[in-house]
């Protein structure tokens, strides 16, 4: 019997057809809002019924489009898209469709598990911390403008991503979005645009984009890298593996252009997890990783950076800045153990809690210390619990699907979850990403793949038992 969400697909088109229909449906769903600037009101209202029908039919594709634009900031990488407010245009029909199919048609059946409980606890703690933040307007602004959207979409992604065809589409969207951002980064590098310290590439820095920080850009790119490499080493069709290889090469080169040490660690972590699937000897894998690390450092030209380069003696300025910031985060948690200083309040409180002042506030440059400083010890414990549950679930799901009779895309997606989580943990130690999209998308997709694996493996086991019973009866 087909899953409940199967009724949401359009016809019986193949994978390419689904993508085409999804893109067409997304455009039609957004058409009324886009047309407000270009068409008379009657025409706009004429589009609304068609847009509503398509929005109700493709909630997953709308959700995926929203994540692609919000996470990869495609509208900032390609400024021509910025005036259309595409993330907002995709969020509204996605939420409407999710609510409709959850409460009206009941074609989407929400479920709950340990990982979502841990996420909910952390979300509540962050929300309570907003009330007690040292600068409430800043905390409220970030919560309403970003974090509440992350919270809602985390549940939406988890409940909508539950079938191999959706894994396939998600892999396509994530890899192509990563390649698009990587292309812009490489273009900027080759043309000397948006460079930080003269050598480190960024995107949209002049417009205040999240990708304007080379470190954050490298972490965003490490996410599609995990999917691309997983496509390469899983037994897919040759063209799909070739696509993954090309995408991985482009993304790695773009990360190298950022000269981010955290980004290089992410490359090693993601590649290491993938390498464990094809290289059984840990000694050989470790040797390859050590050589690869030196090659990446040389290729990235980290020693030539103005901050953190080889010209700085002892512990370089960049490293010392992180140490001072981490100390400030610790002091914030000591003074506010239950709530921290509040969401997005670290930089504003740096002066009051740091033991070293050089005339300017600094970012924490660590996911773990960022969460510690802004949510206190209680929030930090909750966050680490959420991370631990998610990593355990991702590893168990990968092992469960490795020898199961499931489509290759399900296996590569489960491997990508483990690789991306490893990359996040490695790079997140030096990058501030506790309250941005990457980890929450990973949690949601891990939960979705795990839910699929639980059902698929149980069905396979039931079919196997039925076959054995039938064989036993025939022998009699």
Image (tube, helix red, strand yellow):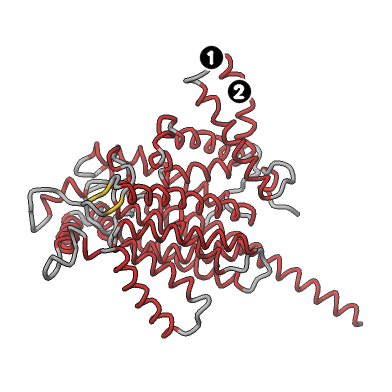
Label 1 to label 2: alpha-carbon separation = 11 Å
- The quadrant where residue 288 appears: bottom left
Is residue 78 shown to the viewer in this render? yes
- Of the 4 image quadrants, the one containing the C terminus is bottom right
Mark 1 or 2: the one toward you: 1
In this view, 439 is above or below 342: below
Per the image, label 2 sits on a secondary structure element best described as: helix
In this view, 340 is above or below 65: below
Q: Residue 47: give its label.
A: 2
- The quadrant where residue 386 appears: bottom left
Query: Residue tagged by mark 1?
Result: 40
Residue 441, percent across and down?
Answer: 46, 53
The foreground one among 124 and 199 is 199
Label 2 crowd (10 A; few <14 / some 14-19 / many >=20): some
User: Reading the chain from its start, which is encountered first: label 1 or label 2?
Assistant: 1
The foreground one among 176 and 377 is 176
The foreground one among 105 and 294 is 294
Marker count (numbered): 2
Residue 32, percent across and down?
Answer: 54, 24
Q: Residue 229: give its label.
A: none
Residue at position x 53%, y 15% in the image: 41
- Of the 4 image quadrants, the one containing the N terminus is bottom right
Residue at position x 34%, y 67% in the image: 265
């Amino acid at each position: 019997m087909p899953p409940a969400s199967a009724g949401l697909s359009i016809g019986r088109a193949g994978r390419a057809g689904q993508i085409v229909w999804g893109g067409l449906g997304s455009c039609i769903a957004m058409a009324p809002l886009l047309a407000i600037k270009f068409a008379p009101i009657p025409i706009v209202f004429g589009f609304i019924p068609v847009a509503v029908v398509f929005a109700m039919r493709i909630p997953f594709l709308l959700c995926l489009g929203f994540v692609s634009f919000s996470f990869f900031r495609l509208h900032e990488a390609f400024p021509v898209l910025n005036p259309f407010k595409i993330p907002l245009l995709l969020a509204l029909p996605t939420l409407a469709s999710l609510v409709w199919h959850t409460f009206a048609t009941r074609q989407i059946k929400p479920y709950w598990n340990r990982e979502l409980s841990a996420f909910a606890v952390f979300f509540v703690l962050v929300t309570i911390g907003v009330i007690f933040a040292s600068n409430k307007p800043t905390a409220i602004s970030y919560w309403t403008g970003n974090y509440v959207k992350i919270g809602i979409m985390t549940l939406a992604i988890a409940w909508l991503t539950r079938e191999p065809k959706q894994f396939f589409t998600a892999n396509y969207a994530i890899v192509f979005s990563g390649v698009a951002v990587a292309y812009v980064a490489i273009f900027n590098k080759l043309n000397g645009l948006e460079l930080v310290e003269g050598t480190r590439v960024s995107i949209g820095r002049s417009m205040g984009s999240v990708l304007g920080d080379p470190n954050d850009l490298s972490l965003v790119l490490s996410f599609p890298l995990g999917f691309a490499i997983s496509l390469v080493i899983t037994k897919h069709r040759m063209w799909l593996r070739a696509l993954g290889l090309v995408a991985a090469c482009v993304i790695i080169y773009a990360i190298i252009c950022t000269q981010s040490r955290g980004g290089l660690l992410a490359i090693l972590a993601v590649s290491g997890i993938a390498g464990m699937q094809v290289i059984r000897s840990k000694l050989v894998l470790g040797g390859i990783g050590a050589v690869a690390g030196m090659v990446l450092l040389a290729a990235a030209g980290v020693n030539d950076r103005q901050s953190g380069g080889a010209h700085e003696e002892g512990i370089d300025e960049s490293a010392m800045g992180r140490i001072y910031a981490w100390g400030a985060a610790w002091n914030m948690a000591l003074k506010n153990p239950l709530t921290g200083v509040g969401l997005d309040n670290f930089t504003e409180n740096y002066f009051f809690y740091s033991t070293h002042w050089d005339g300017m506030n600094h970012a924490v440059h660590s996911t773990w210390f960022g969460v510690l400083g802004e949510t206190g010890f209680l929030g930090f414990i909750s966050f680490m619990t959420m991370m631990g549950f998610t990593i355990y679930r991702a590893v168990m799901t990968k092992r469960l699907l490795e020898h199961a009779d499931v489509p290759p895309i399900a296996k590569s997606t489960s491997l990508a979850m483990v690789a991306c989580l490893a990359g996040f943990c490695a790079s997140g130690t030096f990058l501030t990403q506790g309250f941005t999209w990457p980890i929450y998308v990973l949690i949601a997709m891990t939960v979705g793949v795990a839910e699929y694996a639980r059902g698929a493996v149980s069905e396979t086991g039931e079919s196997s038992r039925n076959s054995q019973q039938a064989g036993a009866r025939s022998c009699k």
